[in-house]
Image (cartoon, grey):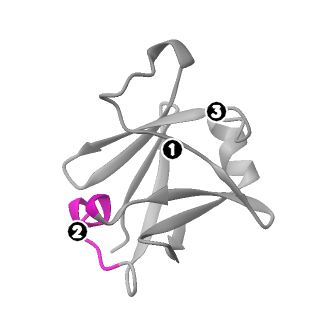
Amino acid sequence: MQRKLVSSGTGWKLYMPKDVLKLLGFNPHETSVLLRMDKNVLKISKIDPDEINQDLLIKKFNKSGNGYGLYISNSIIQFLELNPETDEVKYTIENDVLNITRAV
């Protein structure tokens, strides 16, 4: 599935429908997610509250319209090598991990 990023403060938001979050087993009201970079892929996975520490990049979903948004900072956008004003991102689900890449 492809999406455009939406400007949000000093970064960008990726909006996702509720059904995508359900496929991942994410409860957007309670779930914290771990963001990891692997080459030019942003990998988002569920993290247990016991595993959370200050060395990890942890985010929560924000309610937006009929879905939820995830804030992505400009530094992560640079690692993904995309121009958020013109490029779209593609996300795929693999082994309960949401993979986000630049759509080609």
Asked if residue 55 is positioned above or below residue 5 in the image, the reply reads: above
Q: Label 3 is placed on what type of residue?
A: Thr
Number of marks: 3
The Cα–Cα distance between marks 3 and 1, rounded to whole angstroms, is 17 Å
Say left or right for 28 vs 35: right
Could you say which quadrant of the image residue 56 lies in? top left
Relative image position of residue 79 (x, y in whole percent): 22, 59
Q: Secondary structure at mark 2?
A: loop
Distance from label 1 to label 2 (Cα)?
A: 20 Å
Proximity of marks 3 and 1: CB atoms separated by less than 8 Å: no
Quadrant of the drawing holding the C terminus: bottom left
Image height of 47 relative to 77, above or below: above
Contact between labelled residues 2 and 3, with CB atoms less than 8 Å apart: no
Q: Nearer the viewer, mark 3 or mark 2?
A: 3
Which circle marks residue 93 in the picture? 1
Q: Is residue 96 left or right of residue 27?
A: left
Report the mark closest to the observer, 1 or 2. Answer: 2
User: Residue 22's spot in the image, x, y percent?
Assistant: 72, 40
Q: Quadrant of residue 44?
A: top left
Task: Give the number of the disc on residue 31.
Answer: 3
Foreground mark, 3 or 1, reads: 3
Residue 41 tag number:
none
- The part of the chain drawn in magenta is 75-83
73 falls in the magenta region:
no
Disc 1 marks a residue whose amino acid type is Ile
Q: Where does the N terminus fall, quadrant-wise?
A: bottom right
Q: Earlier in the sequence, mark 3 or mark 2?
A: 3
Q: Earlier in the sequence, mark 3 or mark 1?
A: 3
Q: Position of residue 40 (x, y in %)?
A: 23, 55
Answer whether residue 76 is magenta in the image: yes
Kind of residue at disc 2? Glu
Which residue is disc 2 drawn over? 81
